[in-house]
Amino acid sequence: MALGAFQGDVVWMVMREVLVLISIGLAAGLAGAKLVQAQLYGVTGHDPATVALAALGLAAVACAAGYVPAIRASRIDAMRALRYE
C-alpha cells in the first residue's frame, strides 16, 4: 500500500484492474459466442437472457475474487511492509 494512501483508494485501485479484466473477458466471450454459434443447442449466440445471466454471474464471481485481495492489500501497514522488504 502506498504511503499515505487511504484504504478506499487502495481497494478502488485493485478493483479497477479487476473491472478492466472483466470487460476484456466479456468482450472476448461475446466475440467467441459468434464463432461457436453453430454448436449451441436451443439458444443463439446472442440470446439476451443467457448473455446477461452469464455476464452477471462471471462479473460477480470475478469481483468477489478481486475484493478479498484488495481488502488484504489495504490493511497492510506500509512501514511494516517496507521493513520486511
Image (cartoon, grey):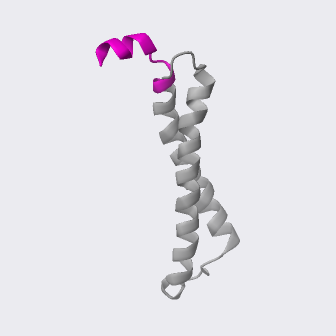
- Residue nearest the observer in this picture, 85 or 33: 85
Q: Report x, y in % for residue 54.
A: 58, 61
Residue 19 appears in view = yes
Most extreme residue toward the right is: 48
Which residue occupies 64% across, 76% down?
A: 46
Which residue occupies 57% across, 30% down?
A: 11
Q: So how many labels did they put on this image?
A: 0
Which residue occupies 61% across, 27% down?
A: 9
- Let me know if residue 80 is in the magenta part: yes
Q: Is residue 37 above or below residue 1?
A: below
Q: Which residues are magenta?
A: 72-85
Q: Is residue 37 above or below residue 68?
A: below
**Splitting the image into 4 quarters, where does residue 58 fall?**
bottom right
Q: Report x, y in % for residue 14.
A: 53, 36
Most extreme residue toward the left is: 85
- Let me know if residue 4 is in the magenta part: no
Q: Is residue 10 above or below residue 85?
A: below
Most common secondary structure along the magenta stretch: helix
Which residue occupies 46% across, 26% down?
A: 73
- Residue nearest the observer in this picture, 82 or 28: 82
Horizontal relation, residue 29 to residue 56: left or right: left
Q: If the image is split into quadrants, where does the C terminus sit?
A: top left
Q: Report x, y in % for residue 21.
A: 52, 53
Residue 40 appears in view = no
Horizontal relation, residue 40 to residue 56: left or right: left
